[in-house]
Image: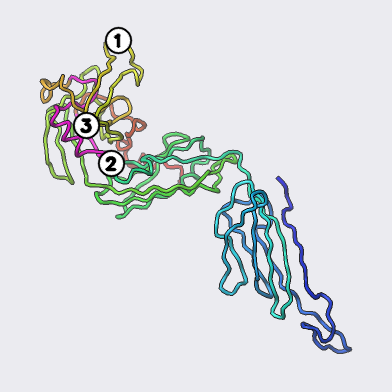
Amino acid sequence: MVTGALVVVALVVGACSSDDSPGAADAPGGSATAAAPVRFDITPGSDGNAPTKPIVVQATGGTLDAVTVTNSVKGTKVKGSFSEDKTSWTSTEVLAYGASYEVVADGVSPDGRKAEQKSTVKTLAPKATVFPSFIPAPSITEVGVGQPIVVKFDKDITDKAAAEKALTVTSAPAQPGGWYWLSKREVHYRPQSYWQAGTTIKVHAGIYGVDLGGGTYGQTDRDLNLKVHDSWVAKADGNTEQMQIFQNGTLVKTMPISMGKDATPTHLGAHVISDKQRDYTMDSCTYGVCSGPQAYKSLEHFAERISNDGEFVHENPNSVGQQGSANVSHGCINLNAANAQWFFDHFGLGDVVEVTNSGGPQLPVWDTYGDWAVPWADWQAGSAVK
């Protein structure tokens, strides 16, 4: 990277003056003293600058007439604005990575003496850039009370604290919450307890221009806006083989179910719906069981995914006789046709299915989404910002 990027050229009009010229003053012995021209301070003055750092031109001993900042390669002009007294100019748009900008400042002193100064400002060139993906995607506008906020980066983050500081979540009403790193590329945010119904959530990934470690910088800033709809929580009990449905804390429906059999028990804990399909082919090969007595492939209806290892709430006509009396599934929560359609019509992304007494292990934190299984103190310990 080239250093010494600052180049200054001062052109003073009328640098020599006679006794009767503007800016001259009578002095003892007949000598004349010229008034000082306007001076400029252009910052930043060296290369390797963050593209989010504005270019500022400050005039001393006069005002600015014009300031142009031009991308040396593209020839595009950078937008900016003058202060009210026209003694300063500040760029108002972020700059590009690895770019060179030619700055030309023109000004005038109170006695009409004009001056010009030029400078070159160069921005840093990252070794790599990182893109942040959101789950839910920005196309999703409404979620349930259990929905975590997920940011996935397309490269490893070595400075997790820098990345986390650049991520902000604002909720109204405000609720305590925090970030938890699942890996070098994935970080989740959730409140201490389920979101309140009606909450608005604003997520901002302000990572552009931020060093995320090892010379890797954020590729772009991104925003996500969500609204939390009514609280829908289903409580599935493996002992009673019943599932109670609560809307905003009020029991509105109870339905018989069949959960995972002893060989394939349903995971315990709070599950969050991450996808729903009216017709869905369930294939055990998708999670590695392609043959043998535990393998299966079948078309199911009104399917809502509650974990990534093949657990769904869905219609299953083959287990209707066991629903309400025995757990016989491969891990899913089976319903009859009428209850499955009702559940499908009322539950969606971010809504919660709490599983108890299934005989299975706790849903892992990484299994889309086991976030609520992590005690709050442990969740806070998963933050990179101490």
| Residue at x 11% of width, y 35% of height | 254
Q: CA distance from mark 1 to mark 3?
A: 27 Å
In-image side of 204 versus 253 (left or right):
right
- Left or right: residue 208 versus residue 98 is left
What colouring method underlies this structural image? rainbow
Task: Name the residue type under label 1.
Answer: Gly
Task: Work out which residue is located at the far right of the displayed protein and give it.
Answer: 29
Give the labeled residue for mark 1.
292
- Asked if residue 348 lies in the magenta stretch, the reply is yes
The stretch of residues the image draws in magenta is 328-356
Q: Nearer the viewer, mark 1 or mark 3?
A: 1
Q: What amino acid is labelled 3 in the image? A: Val
The crowd level at tag 2 (other Cα within 10 Å; few <14, some 14-19, many 20+) is many
Q: Is residue 165 visible?
A: no
The residue to which callout 2 is attached is 146
Residue 301, by quadrant, is top left
Decide: is 322 above or below 348: above
* Residue type beneath disc 2: Gly
Residue appearing at x 14%, y 32% in the figure: 339
Quickly name the residue at label 3.
355
Q: Residues within 10 Å of mark 1 (few under 14, many from 20)?
A: few
